[in-house]
Amino acid sequence: MKEPIIQVENLFAGYHGQAIMEDLTFDIQKGEIFVILGGSGCGKSTVLKHMIGLLPPVSGRVLINGQDMITATGKTKNQMLRQIGVAFQNSALFGSMTVLENIMLPLQEFTRLPKDALFTIARAKLRLVDLSGRGHLLPGELSGGMKKRAAIARAMALDPAIVFLDEPSAGLDPLTSAELDLLIMDLARTLGITFVIVTHELESILTIADAVIMLETDIKGIIAAGSPKDLKDDPSNAYAYQFFNRKPRRDKNP
């Protein structure tokens, strides 16, 4: 049994004291690809922002290796931030900087390595995502898929134990999306990285996910959890079964 690397306990996620999702409790095991899914606008990305410390939750805790991401401060918070990497939906690369400079940025911020070491590490990260030789380009010169790969390379700059990906397949054609799925699986298996992915892309979920939680707007919580295959094959949970088998919901209420 793998150890939980992330524990979310009684999390009320939302803004300005108003909960969008209520009382979320789940564990993420070390080394797995964990997917947070649900319909558009259900709060998936909001939950992710709470987990990485960008937003304070209404209440609840997010523990990373036993330490509370939400209440940590100072040196402890910086050490925790070094354990995680994040790639946002729009890649969030700085347009005025080359790809290599984008990847070097976290290293410059959190380390005191000499410049030649920064270049060496950044080039190594580009190789991991199959972008060797593209470091001199600006983000605007990259295809959509390349931007996603560059964002993942930057997220891995500090060798994090956990990488969060927000809608990594958004805007990609099916072939490019499938190639990105293979990259994520390869990085998880070869480097032991734990991936936490927010998406509603069914094909990607069925391909890469070890475990999922499904968020549902009406109940403001988790309506199903488990492996994608189990949820796809189990008609006892109507909402999950309909989602994984692409069956339209004739009744709004699950």
Image (spheres, helix red, strand yellow):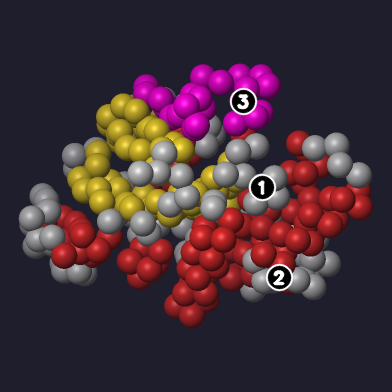
Question: What amino acid is at disc 2?
Answer: Leu
Which of the two marks, 1 or 2, is nearer to us in this view?
Answer: 1
Pointer 3 or 1: first along the chain: 3
Q: Residue at x 27, y 60 (%)?
A: 228
* Label 3 – label 1 distance at C-alpha: 17 Å
Helix, strand or loop status at disc 1 = loop
Residue under label 1, please give it: 159
- What mark, if any, has residue 77 been given in the picture? 3
Q: Is residue 142 above or below residue 117?
A: below
Q: Is residue 70 magenta?
A: yes
Q: Residue at x 48, y 80 (%)?
A: 175
- Near-viewer residue (32 or 171): 32
Q: Which residues are magenta?
A: 57-80
Question: What amino acid is at disc 1?
Answer: Asp
* Label 1 – label 2 distance at C-alpha: 18 Å
Q: Is residue 222 left or right of residue 167?
A: left
Pointer 1 or 2: first along the chain: 2
Residue under label 2, please give it: 131
Q: Residue at x 61, y 19 (%)?
A: 73
Q: Is residue 141 above or below residue 124?
A: below
Pointer 2 or 3: first along the chain: 3
Circles 3, 1 touching at the beta carbon (< 8 Å)? no
User: Badge 3: how crowded within 10 Å, few (<14), some, or many (20+)?
Assistant: some
- Near-viewer residue (114 or 246): 114
Q: Quadrant of residue 17?
A: top left
Q: Is residue 214 left or right of residue 157?
A: left
Q: Is residue 152 above or below residue 215?
A: below
Specify the quadrant that holds the N terminus. top left
